[in-house]
Structures are given as C-alpha cells and as structure tokens.
Image (cartoon, rainbow, N blue to C red):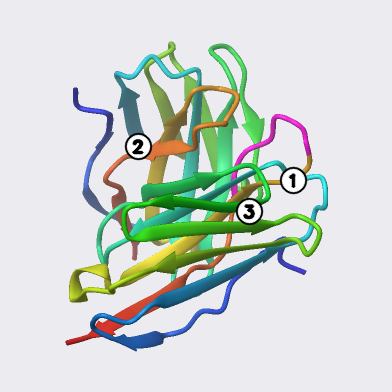
Amino acid sequence: QKEVEQNSGPLSVPEGAIASLNCTYSDRGSQSFFWYRQYSGKSPELIMSIYSNGDKEDGRFTAQLNKASQYVSLLIRDSQPSDSATYLCAVILNSGNTPLVFGKGTRLSVIA
Amino acid sequence: NAGVTQTPKFQVLKTGQSMTLQCAQDMNHNSMYWYRQDPGMGLRLIYYSASEGTTDKGEVPNGYNVSRLNKREFSLRLESAAPSQTSVYFCASGMGQDYYGYTFGSGTRLTVV
C-alpha cells in the first residue's frame, strides 16, 4: 500500500472555479505536509506547506489538514489555465527526521 | 543564486555504460536527495544524504551509488546502465530538518538503449 495516496486525475475544472485536490497518508504520527506543483517537463516547485490542523491560506491557494482523518487537501480558488499542472502531495511520515514521501500526483486541467 | 544545479540535462547511454549525474546547491543546505520520476510512479527516492559525510538508501537504490563530495555536491553514479534506469532524475536539497520542504534541480532526462 502506497503511503501517500492521491487520485491521478485528470481533474478538469472550468476557469474561475475552485479546484479541490486531495491526499491521504498512512502514518498517523506524520507532522509535516507539502504541496508541490509540477508543469509538464519541469521540476517540482513548492507552493504550500502545512503543519497544524486547520486551514492555511496563501493567495488563491488554501491547504487544509485533518490529522485525525489523515487527510490533507489543496484548494485553488479562481482557477486559471496557468494552474494546469500536476500537483504532488508530500509528507514526512512519522515524527522522525525522514525524507519526504511523495504521492503520484493529480493532474489538473483548467479549461478556458 | 542558482539554487540546485544538475548536469547534464539530457543523456543517452548504451546498456552497460556508466555515468555520473552531478548535483550542486548553493543554499547552504545540509541534506541532499536523488529521486527518479517515471510515468505513473511518481517521485521515488534513490539515495539521500542527511548531512555531509553520511548517505542512506531510499526506496529504489539498486543499480546506483552516491557520493557526498562536500556540503554543496552530491553525485549519483550508474555503474552499468540498464534500460530500466531510463527515467528523469531529480536532485533536491533541504535545510536538514525537512521542515521547509525541498528545492529541486531542473532534472536529467536519461535514456538507456
């Protein structure tokens, strides 16, 4: 069983809509959670990090964390065609100093 | 600042050939990582170095070796390339406690024929 799970998509949303990307993880002791954006042919780029239960907002992006449900999500408000990319969820599993584990990513397509 | 620099960007090898992928960071990061990315498989960790002088295996280390040359540089070596090692390779670096996530290099696209 993959330790960090994401739906592969593609997730298609119309321009201006809210895109909701979801991620679940296996280790209840995990403490640090990240969202990366990866355009086709490019390297992953960190866009959000979250460590506490609740919401964290940065511009059009909101990360949501629910440790009891082992669930982290990314909301993109007012989606733009330039948001079309693959979004990778990454987790530091357990409370130790271990490397990031990545989900397989969700491909988002924003339709103009 | 250049961030994380990887060389080469593209490479074609014949089966059995060897090569070294180079990675250097100028952010004074303690930890460095090598990932490979294959379609449908996501990013998988090959090796990492939590600090200068240490290296550890990741999820898919077979067929690879690494060297942490100094704090800035972390190289990945394929001793005898196989077609299964055709992939995109990413080097990344982090503060060490991983609290702030990683910065990635631009990647090396390797094809083994």
Residue A69 image-quadrant placement: bottom right
Give the residue number, with chain letter if any, for mark 2: B21
> Which residue type carries mark 3?
Gly
Rounded to the nearest whole Å, what is the CA distance between mark 2 and mark 1?
32 Å
Which label sits on residue A30? 1
Marked residue chain, label 2: B
Number of other residues with Cα within 10 Å of mark 3, as a class: few under 14, some 14 to 19, many 20 or more: few
Q: Is residue A98 magenta?
A: yes
Number of other residues with Cα within 10 Å of mark 1, as a class: few under 14, some 14 to 19, many 20 or more: some
Looking at the figure, which quarter contains the N terminus of chain B?
top left
What's the residue at 51%, 57% (across, down)? A63
Range of magenta residues: A95-101
Give the residue number, with chain letter if any, for mark 3: A54
> Which residue type carries mark 2?
Leu
What's the residue at 26%, 57% (across, down)? A42
> Which residue type carries mark 1?
Ser
Q: Is residue B28 magenta?
A: no
Q: Nearer the viewer, mark 2 or mark 1?
A: 1
Q: Nearer the viewer, mark 1 or mark 3?
A: 3
Measuring from the top left, give residue B87's x and y in whole percent.
40, 60
> In this rendering, would B5 be left or right of A57?
left
Instruction: Check whether the beta carbons of the residues at disc 1 and disc 3 lie within 8 A of each other.
Output: no
Residue B85 appearing in the image: no
Rounded to the nearest whole Å, what is the CA distance between mark 1 and mark 3?
15 Å
